[in-house]
């Protein structure tokens, strides 16, 4: 059985990827690592947890050696809106963690998954049914890191044979752990407000279409791609994956169908407005469907039902 290391495991994706991988590969074969002590503490309740600074190559490599790791999932990244507040730090963290992951994967012959994002696209990308292979000139530091990461990961595959694979995640919607600092975060936060009976103030323009995905589909995509037959992969870094695309008005209307008293208003953040306008409205994911069988199961309506069922407002507001 494969032994897996997840770095940056305490965040929105890692919190749910850890149990998902445990189910697929066995509890003892998944090592969850994070930099922040409170995250390591939280992870230690569900998995073998380790403290690691992904920017410290020696410590990172020691962990891979200690557990005889076969596959690395590198989830370390500052998201788009946070990145714009401190671009140098975003570059340092996002690229530092990726470069170390690539070099360690090369040295220890591990496969490597690093998420890319809709943020890899930019204002002059075709926005409707954005093709897999198209113009990519993002104007955020997050996007610049993602495009660079895609290119570097493909380079390590062709030059050194490192088994690198990746998907361009849409905004991920989930109730396990809150995202932080992303432009798509509104589509998660709003559920906490609706369920707590509070009004929600949205910072993203009402008509901004962006691709979104529900966490179960995001997890399935990750493991499906990592298990895909390499001979079928024409692309590697990174695949468009799509399942739903909506505007703030559309998701708020779906929520209001179930919570008739829910109210929202807008206080537009110009940075988030510019970022959302530069990203695709909806991506074409044909290559992912053809090359490794991507087939999402969740749509907007079912996702809203499930989120409202599971979200615990206390996680955001404390006990009411
Ligand atoms: N969810 C991310 C963000 O909004 C995009 O991948 O930054």
Image: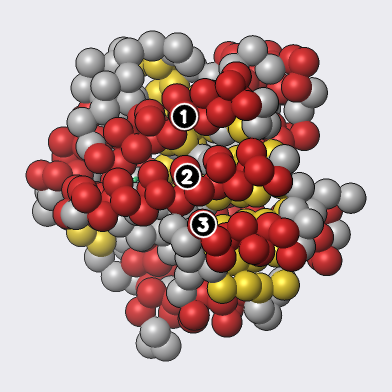
Task: Please rate how many residues cluster around mark 2, counting C-alpha atoms within 10 Å: few if below 14, some from 14 to 19, many from 20.
Answer: many
What residue is shown at x 74% (from left), y 15% (from top)? 232
What residue is shown at x 66% (from left), y 64% (from top)? 63
For residue 128, above or below residue 75: above
**Is the C-beta separation of discs 1 and 3 under 8 Å?**
no
Task: Please rate how many residues cluster around mark 1, counting C-alpha atoms within 10 Å: few if below 14, some from 14 to 19, many from 20.
Answer: some
Q: How is the image coloured?
A: secondary structure
Which residue bears the numbered disc 1? 152
Which residue bears the numbered disc 2? 98
**Is the C-beta separation of discs 2 and 1 under 8 Å?**
yes
User: Does dot 3 land on a helix, a strand or a loop?
Assistant: helix
Mark whose residue sits in front, 1 or 3: 3
Mark found first going from the N terminus, 2 or 1: 2
Which residue bears the numbered disc 3? 57
Q: CA distance from mark 2 to mark 3?
A: 11 Å
User: Does dot 1 land on a helix, a strand or a loop?
Assistant: helix
What residue is shown at x 33% (from left), y 25% (from top)? 121
Mark whose residue sits in front, 2 or 3: 3
For residue 263, above or below residue 297: below
Q: Position of residue 26 (x, y in %)?
A: 85, 59
Q: Nearer the viewer, residue 301 or 38?
A: 38
Q: Is residue 274 in view?
A: yes
275 left or right of 287 in image: left
Q: Position of residue 302 (x, y in %)?
A: 58, 44
Task: Please rate how many residues cluster around mark 3, counting C-alpha atoms within 10 Å: few if below 14, some from 14 to 19, many from 20.
Answer: some
Q: CA distance from mark 2 to mark 1?
A: 9 Å
Q: Position of residue 37 (x, y in %)?
A: 49, 80
For residue 234, above or below residue 72: above
């Amino acid at each position: 059985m494969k032994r897996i290391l997840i770095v940056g495991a305490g965040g929105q994706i890692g919190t749910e990827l850890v149990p998902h991988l445990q189910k697929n590969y066995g509890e003892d074969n998944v090592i969850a690592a994070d930099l922040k002590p409170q995250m390591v503490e939280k992870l230690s309740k569900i998995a073998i947890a380790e403290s690691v600074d992904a920017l410290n190559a020696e410590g990172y490599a020691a962990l891979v050696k200690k557990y005889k790791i076969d596959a690395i999932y590198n989830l370390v990244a500052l998201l788009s809106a946070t990145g714009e507040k401190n671009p140098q730090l975003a570059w340092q963290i996002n690229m530092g963690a990726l470069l170390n992951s690539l070099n360690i994967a090369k040295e220890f012959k591990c496969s490597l998954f690093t998420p890319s994002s809709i943020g890899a696209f930019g204002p002059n990308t075709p926005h409707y049914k954005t093709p897999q292979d198209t113009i990519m000139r993002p104007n955020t530091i997050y996007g610049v890191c993602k495009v660079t990461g895609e290119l570097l990961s493909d380079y390590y595959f062709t030059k050194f044979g490192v088994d690198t694979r990746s998907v361009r995640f849409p905004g991920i919607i989930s109730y396990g752990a809150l995202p932080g600092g992303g432009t798509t975060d509104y589509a998660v936060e709003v559920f906490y407000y609706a369920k707590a009976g509070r009004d929600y103030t949205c910072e993203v323009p009402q008509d901004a279409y962006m691709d979104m995905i529900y966490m179960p589909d995001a997890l399935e995509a990750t493991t499906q791609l990592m298990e895909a037959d390499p001979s079928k992969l024409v692309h590697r870094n990174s695949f468009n994956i799509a399942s739903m695309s909506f505007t703030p008005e559309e998701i708020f209307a779906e929520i209001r169908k179930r919570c008739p008293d829910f109210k929202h208003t807008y206080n537009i953040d110009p940075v988030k407005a510019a970022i959302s306008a530069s990203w695709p409205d909806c991506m074409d994911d044909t290559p992912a469907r053809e090359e490794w069988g991507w087939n999402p199961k969740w749509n907007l309506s079912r996702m809203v039902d499930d989120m409202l069922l599971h979200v615990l407002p206390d996680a955001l507001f404390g006990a009411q």
